[in-house]
Amino acid sequence: MPGLGEQLAVLPPLAKVLTGAFMLVLGGAAMAMQPWSFDSGILAVLALVLGVPLLLAGRKEQVAQRVYAAELQRAKAELGELRAAIAEVLKEKHGVERFLLERGYSSPKVRRWIALECDLPAHLPR
């Protein structure tokens, strides 16, 4: 059976954010109800140790998803222009991945999608 960390890692980003926030609220509530209790102190520390990283990981994943969606939309809009520019890059024997990074495509998934759309399997990001 997978451990708690493995189970939390596969949660969707919004669920991570909500679970982390819920843990923090529970830890705060425990400290508010019994501020000097050993049990509430342990619960508060546990909430901090688990809740904060989970909340931050969820937010980071949400930002990455938004970046991916925006870059993919931009790549779809610029696909014709990208094909011509990549053909020039290949003629000059420069790196396609570097070219795409310079164009602002920071997401490896989007660069891979562009390479597949431009029939460049040898230039796919790993």
Image (tube, rainbow, N blue to C red):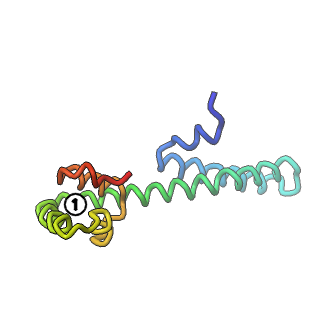
Q: Please state which amino acid type lies under the numbered disc 1.
A: Ala
Q: Which residue is at a point 24% across and 54% down the rendered structure image?
A: 115
Q: Which residue is at a point 65% across and 49% down the rendered structure image?
A: 23
Residue lying farthest to the top in this orientation: 1
Q: Nearer the viewer, residue 44 or 2?
A: 2
Please tell me how many numbered marks the rendered image carries.
1
Can you identify the residue that label 1 sits on? 75
Relative to 19, residue 104 above or below = below
Quadrant, the N terminus: top right
Q: Which of 78 and 63 is in front in this view?
A: 78
Q: In this view, does 68 lie to the left or right of 22?
A: left
Residue 85 in picture, x, y percent from top left: 16, 68
Tag 1, which secondary structure?
helix
Residue 117 in picture, x, y percent from top left: 19, 51
Label 1 crowding class (10 Å Cα cut-off): few <14, some 14-19, many 20+?
some
Quadrant of the rendered structure where residue 94 is? bottom left
Q: Which residue is at a point 84% across and 57% down the rendered structure image?
A: 35
Q: Which of 12 and 115 is in front in this view?
A: 115
Quadrant of the rendered structure where residue 83 is? bottom left
Q: In this view, does 96 lie to the left or right of 2?
A: left
